[in-house]
Each structure stands twice: as structure tokens, then as C-alpha cells.
Amino acid sequence: MADLDATLSQADSNLDDSIDRLTQLVRIKSISTDPAYAADCRKAAEWLVDALNDIGFSAGVRDTIGHPMVVAHHDGPDGAPHVLFYGHYDVQPVDPIELWTNDPFAPVITELTPGRKVITGRGTSDDKGQLMTFVEACRAYKQTHGTLPCKVSILFEGEEESGSISLQPFLDANAEELKADLALVCDTGMWDPDTPSISVALRGLTGEEVTVKAASRDLHSGHYGGNAANPIHILASILGAMHDADGRVTIPNFYDGVHETPDHIKAAWEALGPPKGFLEDIGLSIPSGEKDRSILERCWARPTAEVNGIVGGYTGEGFKTVIPAEASAKVSFRLVGDQDPVAVRENFRAFVRQRIPADCSVAFAEHGTSGAIQLSYDAPELAKAGAALEAEWGKPAALTGMGGSIPIVGDFQSKLGMNSLLVGFALEDDSIHSPNEKYDLRSFHKGVRSWIRILDALAS
Amino acid sequence: MADLDATLSQADSNLDDSIDRLTQLVRIKSISTDPAYAADCRKAAEWLVDALNDIGFSAGVRDTIGHPMVVAHHDGPDGAPHVLFYGHYDVQPVDPIELWTNDPFAPVITELTPGRKVITGRGTSDDKGQLMTFVEACRAYKQTHGTLPCKVSILFEGEEESGSISLQPFLDANAEELKADLALVCDTGMWDPDTPSISVALRGLTGEEVTVKAASRDLHSGHYGGNAANPIHILASILGAMHDADGRVTIPNFYDGVHETPDHIKAAWEALGPPKGFLEDIGLSIPSGEKDRSILERCWARPTAEVNGIVGGYTGEGFKTVIPAEASAKVSFRLVGDQDPVAVRENFRAFVRQRIPADCSVAFAEHGTSGAIQLSYDAPELAKAGAALEAEWGKPAALTGMGGSIPIVGDFQSKLGMNSLLVGFALEDDSIHSPNEKYDLRSFHKGVRSWIRILDALAS
């Protein structure tokens, strides 16, 4: 504990220099979507390599068909776990530039409200400020101990804001080198300014397109209405039957692999409540979906079946009394736990086929599958990271989920067989992707301290 | 009866001249959609005026903002009914001209199969041949008796194939002059080559567009899926609930004003059976719609609720995991009997509103209403015309319906308060609107004789 305190003190002493280094990194215009900034992206990668080598990592720039990766390694004590830290050095474009109060690449520190200092500039929160919390944590640890508590590898990509086209091939080509016991990802946010968060559940996805075909051509509804099958009716009936009155999905075996969330987690979610204005901000007030589940449970731990698009017949201006030959819908399933994305597809198809009249037909098209990510609530690393965050912030970490997927986490899982611990310090008002993106210096400072505590805890 | 036989004999003697006159009329290129043929349209109108004046009508060309109308009047005996005969002298374009075996405006008579002579040319069936059956019937009657058995007015329009834009204003402006006891319309077909037909029921229509609105903007289905109302689900559920398992429409009070078809009519329809290949030709085999009703009853005497178009969310290539802000559908109701088109609209709206969650909304847009046309099965003119046709063809006339509406019949009903008797002699293989349009000389000859018998019967 004395050792940990010393490391944390070192981080405190470093703070001004740490902020200075973050400022240097933010000054580099590493906009990945715009080819005009390709050299800046490389410059950011090289800056990071220098910073990591300076700390004692063995770091290098690794070329891809797009922007380069940064890969770094640092040994740890025998028997200590091996972690792979992930972040991205590329940033969003800055338009509309006229809404910025300062040059987005000349970051300034201001006091937002009394005592609340923030650094404003593109990438301060997403993701340069966040990844630097980890880099500076390693620096303080190294300064204090001459080594790191775990074996630490680092992967920074430069294409996160532009589609990550190089990422999967890079993971495939370097799987042996990058595989660790656990991935640490710092690209998420706090639950609120005082409550740290670990994202433990990310929903998966099965995407599917269904086309119901009836007559061999569009028909006049006067001549054929009442006798010829209408594929819109068939499709609407099927989609309308996909949920029961309690909001549960009615597709047989759909809930196979869905596990009940432990009571203490559910209770914690009830206590957190939904984010302020979650439905109100979009003009709604009544949670739809499964009865007797909280909003957070529905979003994080329950699967869904959603129609994302539907089309059939005449949809232009005015009116046409047609019975169309076909109608189609795009349907997606958000998956949790151990739901098999392929089985979900097959079960859906069977559900549909059963409802197609004998003289009609149905065609399906796949639109991707990805399994859900679920860190076990009993995982020791979760307990350790949670305790570390609680020690730093004085409040238990919220164990949260995410309604959607984060591709990198799925890739780490599928390509490297590695769980991810998602811890981040961004705040709701950070304006990521928008003008005047900022990062609280408190997030930065306590973020550094949080990673020191987490690395220390994971090693124990 | 001796008198009637004399008149029919006169028609028989006239036949070659009648065909010659029809040929003259067909030679006039009265294509109404193409402004290049405007003078031809007027020429056709003038030709008809001359022909009618020649018979003894008081006929004239009446200008409109489009092509002219022909209006003619002939007195009848005191106390005799007043009928208004309707036909149209304009024809469809002739493209693709290369598929014609003769010049469409130089009609030729050929023997299609041994003993079956047809006249081929644009408008021979639709509608010049048909309207000439009535004109030649009047001619034979006048030749035989020096007068006509009924007071007869005639209205020929020249815009039926191009939208009839002048018709409603013309009916409004000349209602007093055109109103009769009964309209006779000759623009329909035989049930089959041996079975004459009277169309007694035409379905009406209520068109409606419904838009379900949920969130104030499109949502990400990962973040909001399971909590935010999906308007496609709401719409699909509503449309899916619009029919029960027996194919009946579930909207409360929807069947108000629907009368059961008399058993003897139903039995006759069962005996007629559906048109050959009715479903097979469009790739279907199982009649959908109301259980325990024949195909013909469903098409002619039962109302429908059909979705003619639906759209919501992402409908382009690929996939987008969106929960859309809104989804909409176009719905039409085919109406029969005394269904009130406005009440149908209101009942549908109530049905929808009841199923909209409290935090969502719905908007409607009207797309027209027209009531059904139903000639009473007990109407004396129906019995008279039916007997007349049976006497001519040796088979009872099929009392048929039409699944769609014929605007002129609705206009006669709504603007002139007049029922219409729809009798026509076209055959399924007449290729109307297509290359090599033809009219059987048997249809023409027996059509003339049929109108002689009908006029005679109506006067008795």
C-alpha cells in the first residue's frame, strides 16, 4: 500500500507535465478520414512511439494499408498477468470550425465552473486524453518502481474514426504477438461525474432481411382484392406477431442462451436508474419492450427483435390501388449472454416460413452476425478493477452494459480469445465528435490514478 | 312479338351496311391522349352526329375544354321510360405498331377459326364496335317502326382513354338535359362467348394513408432497442390485426351496410365459377380472403381492406440498425352495398388510434371515397334486360359484379341520381389496349339484336 501511495503521489507530481504531453499530442492534426492529414496521423503515431520508448517500452510504428498502428511491449514480473491496452490516436474532423471557441488543435485549459478545469481541443476526450491516462499511469509506475506490475502490451490504432479497415487483418497477422490475458480498453465514459463505470456487457447482433413474395406481378386491388394474397398483410402479420403483449419476443427458442442478470446487479441498475432524459429527450415517455424489466436491464441485458426498415407496394405521392408482388423488411436482433447469432437467424426464418401461405414464398438475406460480449460477473479481474476504481473515486464502480456493440471488443474476443475490461473517464458533456470537445482535468488526473490502481490490483 | 321479329330481321338485313359503317368509324384515328389526333377526335364526334341525325336523332357536337362530347336525343312514346346510352368514341394509342398484322386504322375482316369472323382494328371492341351495336339497334328499330320504343338520349365522350377530365363538369353543366330514368352503358364484356352478362355491382373505395410517429428522430437500435417504441412494430401490429384468421376484417362496424347476396345469385356465381386461370395466371393457387365465400362473391359482393403500400426506416441496400421516427402505410377499402365510405374511414381511424401508445401519435391523410354501386336484384329493368338477353343468346345472362369501380357509373349515380345497366359484348380475347384489337362479328350482330330486345323490353 505504501508502494501504491508512492506511485499515486508520483502521478500527482507529474500532472502538469502529463497535461503538457497531452497538449503536445492534441496539437497533432490526426484526422483519419481526410487524406490531407495522413502525415499528421503518422506524426501522432511516431509521437506515441517516442513517448512509450521514453517510458521504457519497446515501441514501434507498424505500417498498414491505412494509417499505422502503434505496438509497444513492456515486460512484467514472472507470473504477473499480461494485459493489452487499446486506444486510438486518430480524431474526428473539426467541422463546423466556426463553432469552436478556440483552435481545435491549439488546446486551451479553462475553468468551466468554479474549480472545474477542462482542456478543450479535438481528441481531448476521444481518445487522446483517455489513452494518455494509461500512458501516464505506466510512466508514474515505472518512475516509482523501475518496472510495471503486469506485462503490458499496447495497441493504438489510427483508423477508429474512419472504419478501422486495417484492424482485423492486423489482428490476424499479429495474433501471437498481441494476445494477452485481458484487454484494457479506454474509450468509454463515467456513469456520471462522480461514478466510475466498467462496461461488462455488450449486445451482439444478427441482421436479416426478409422478402415475402405472392403473385408473380403487381395486381389491381379491385380485380384481385379479397382473393389474391397480399404480401404486405403476410409480412405485417408476421412482424406484428413477433412480440407478445408483454413485449417478449415470441420466436421459439429465441431466449435460449439468455441468462438472468444476478439480483445484486439488477438492484444496482435499479439504483442507477436510466440516464437523465433517456426517453424524454427523444419525445417519448413510456418504455416499450419487456414488462417488469428496468430500462437499463432492457438495454444492457435483454435481447431485442427490431424491424429497422419495411417497404412494399406503392410508397410515392398520392395513391395507387395495387396489391404488390412482394414486400420486405430488415430485421435486427440484439443479442445477450450466450445467444447463438446463427441459431437466432434460423429460428427467425423458421418462424417466418411457418406463416407463409403455401402458394407464396419467402427469401432471406443475411446482414451479419456478432455474438454478445459478457464479462462474467464473477470474473476476478472485474472484482479487482472494481475495487481499484472504488478506492480512487470513493464510490463503487457502476457495472454497466452497452446496447450496441464495440467492434474492437468483439474482435479481441473472436480473433484473440481475450476478454476486455472497458474503463473510461469521459463525461456526457465532453462533446465528442462535436465542436469544443473537452476533457475534464479531473477525469485525466483521476484516470491516471485509476489505471495505476487497476494495474496494481490486477497484479495482486 | 311479330313487331320484334320484324325489327330483328331488319337488323339482320342491315348487317353488311352496319359493318361498313363501323369500318368507317374505326378508320378515324381518334386517339385522345395524343394532341396530334385532336382533329381526328372531332371528326369521329362529327361522324357520329351525322349518323345519329341520319337515324332521326337530334344530335350535336358539344365542345369541352378537351375533346368534344356527342349528345343526341330522340323522343319516345308517352309514358315510355327515358334511357341515356353512354359510350366513348376515343381509342387507345396503337404502339407497338410493329405487332399489328394490319394497319390499325384500316380494319380488315378475317376468319379467326372456321365460322368465327372478326374485325381487327383499333377501337373495334373498345368502344366503337360496342357503341355501334346500340346505334345500329336504334337504326333498325326506327326503320321498322318509324320511332323508338323509349325516349333515348345518347352521350358519347372522347376522353375515356385519357382521364375523362371534361366529363364531370359536363354532367354538372347539363344535368337537367342528361338525366334519364336509367343509363345504359356498353363498355363491358360477355361472361364467355356464349353467356351474356349484366354488371350489377361495382365496388366503391375509401383510400387512406396512416403515419405512425414515435420518437422525435431516428434512433440507434443498440442504444434504444428494447425501450423506445418502434413505429414499424406498431404499424405492423395494427395492419396485422386488421383481418382475423377467417379473413374477415376486424375493424368494428366495418360490415355495416354490407348485405348478403341473395342465395339464388350466390348459387349462380358458384355455377359460373371463377374466370379460367384467375389465380393460376398470377402464380397463385389458394384464394385468400374471407372463408366460406366463393371467389366471385369475394370479388363482387364482399368488401376488402388492403394495404397498398408500406414504408418505414431504412429500405436501401445493405443494413442500418435504426429505429425510425415514423412509418406509414396506404390502405384502401373496397366497399359494397350501402357501406358508407366516410364511416369506413372513421372506423378505421378509431381502430388505429386505439392501438397507438400514449406517447406516440398518428396522422391520417384522405385519398378519396366513392360509394359502391349496386343495382337491386329485384329491379324490374334488370329482369327485363335479363330476359331480353336470354331470348337472344339462349342462355340466362350472368349477373356479374366488378371488383373495381367504373367512374362514369359512379358519376351517373352521384350527379344524375341514375342507375346504370352495364351490358357489353366484348370477349376476353379482344386484345383491347393491345395490338390486333378485334371484335367478333357475332358480338356485333347479336349485340345489335340484344339492344333491340332490351329497348323493347324496357318499354313494356
Image (spheres, coloured by chain):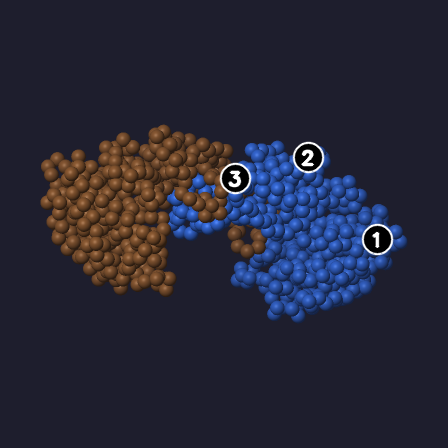
Chain colours: A blue, B brown
Residue B216, percent from left and from top = 50, 46
x, y percent for residue B98: 37, 64
Question: Is residue B226 visible in this depiction of the protein?
Answer: no
Disc 2: which chain? A
Percent coordinates x, y for residue B37 in the rendering: 25, 62
Task: Name the image quarter holding residue B424.
Answer: top left
Residue B253 shown left or right of residue B439 in the figure: right
Position of the C terminus of chain B, as image quadrant, is top left
Mark 1 crowdedness (10 Å alpha carbons): few <14, some 14-19, many ≥20: many
x 58%, y 62%: residue = A94
- Direction right: furthest residue: A78
SS label for mark 1:
loop
Q: Amino acid at mark 3?
A: Ser
Read off the residue under disc 1.
A149
Closest to the observer: B382 or B174?
B382
Q: Is residue B456 visible?
A: yes
Residue type beneath disc 1: Pro
* Between marks 1 and 3 in the image, the one whose residue lies nearer the viewer: 3
Query: What residue is disc 3 on?
Result: A237
Name the side, left or right, on which B147 lies relative to A55: left
Q: Would residue B195 be found to the left or right of residue A150 on screen?
A: left
Which callout, 2 or 3, points at the residue further toward the start of the chain? 3
Q: Which residue is mark 2?
A: A267
Label 3: which secondary element: helix
Label 3, residues with CA under 10 Å away: few <14, some 14-19, many ≥20: many
User: Which residue occupies 88% across, 51% down?
Assistant: A79
Q: How far is mark 1 from mark 3, CA to CA?
A: 59 Å
Could you tell me how far apart the alpha carbons at marks 2 and 3 are, in whole angstroms?
Answer: 37 Å
